Amino acid sequence: MFLKIFIICLIIIFIFSCLVFVIFLNPIENYYGDINVLINQLRTSIFISVIIITAISLLIAVIFSRILSKPIKELNTAARNLASGNFKSKVFFKGRDEFKELADSFNYMNDQMKSSFDELSGQKEELSSIISSIREGLLVIDSKGKILLSNESFRKSFQINSVYGKFYWEVLRVPYLGGLIEKVIDEKASASAELVLHDKTFLCDAIFLNSRKELVITFHDITEIRNLEKIKRDFVANLSHELRTPLTAIKGYVETLELETKEDENLHYIDVIKRNTERLINIVQDLLLLSELEEKGSTLQLEEVNLKNVIKDVLRIFEQKLKNKKLDLKFNVDSEIPLIKADVFKLEQMFINVIDNAIKYTEKGWISISLKQKDDKVVIEIQDTGIGIPESHLPRIFERFYVVDKSRSKKLGGTGLGLSIVKHIVLLHNGEINIESTYGSGTKITIILPINNS
């Protein structure tokens, strides 16, 4: 279109130029007068021709600019309306030139943008509905700690009206939360922790989004669960305290009867009563110990501990049992094992339970204990060639009262609390415990403890 208009304008200007020259120069050809008069006439003709050609060019330029500016203005107005969100703004031109094609492309783009905008709006409303319906508190913050998003449950749980644009420490004054967020940002991984705020207990999960450099934090209200656990612990502790006194009395009277009874038949019954009383007393003692370990206020009496000496002291308790079963004992220690910060009394309880289990469930073969250092931790491995544990039982082996073979456990006097106590002691020391076992071949327990505990 533009090329056609340009060519037409050139042709019009050329024709007008020729006409002007013909009109003004024709009298000069028949004029034979003075040369000066001829030159003056020629100058006048050229000047008039230039003025006429310029006027015509300006007129054509004005017409041409109006032809171009009108559709451009319409397109500009429509584009501004589209930018402001008015998707009804469209442009229609007659003809089949470039402006018509441009208008059609603009209208198509308008339709596509409206469709995309409607889809995004629907997704946003759906996402907002989902976030609002979540019962757990939800908080999204950027890497600098500024709050980008929160849901209604979060604002209700923490009794806050407006949080957008604030820093999380302005809204939640919980020291542990800051440490959790810093850990997640530094490690760029997920982490969780329990937080207590406004007499409520929350399980806080924080996930780092690498693509957006943001953190998504969820707050699960577990106050009721923790209250029920406390009620259960208090019940067990109180019951254990109440049972300990009568059981001790029963044991005392049974031992007296045992000394005074001479009939073999009665001695058998007394032996059964005595054995079961001792088992009940062991269960009560283990329950009391477990309740103490599970208490949040349970603390460690930290001191520098020589693990090699602790294990040697514990092994002296089991020397006779090892001889009776004719089990070989292997005790391997690295040349240099540093002293660790730990509670020596609780470590003794831990080793007594683990080694006692290894001896109980090993009829022949050997028991191996190894002690080695790995980086800033100490690794203790206790392995036996006993009956082992079926793979299906391994996930539940640290649960209270869980035993693999109930009949065998009762026969050996097990309470089902030993490994649960061991796990709690390890966790109190910020350590890890793992168990590997093959049924019929033996079991290996690995305990990892930090050297410098705090």
Image (cartoon, grey):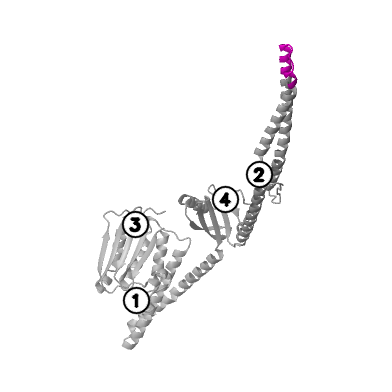
Nearer mark to the viewer, of 3 and 1? 3
Q: Mark 2 to mark 4: distance in Å?
A: 56 Å
| Mark-to-mark CA distance, 4 and 1 | 56 Å
Query: From this viewpoint, is residue 349 visible?
Result: no
Q: Residue 141: x, y in percent? A: 56, 51
The amino acid type, in three-letter code, at marker 1 is Leu
Q: Earlier in the sequence, mark 4 or mark 1?
A: 4
Q: Which residue matches tag 4?
A: 168
Residue on which disc 3 sits: 378
Mark 2 highlights which residue? Answer: 98
Residues shaded magenta: 26-43
Secondary structure, mark 2, is: helix
Quarter placement of the N terminus: top right
User: What amino acid is at disc 3?
Assistant: Val
**Circle 1 residue:** 412
- Closer to the chain start, of discs 2 and 1, is 2
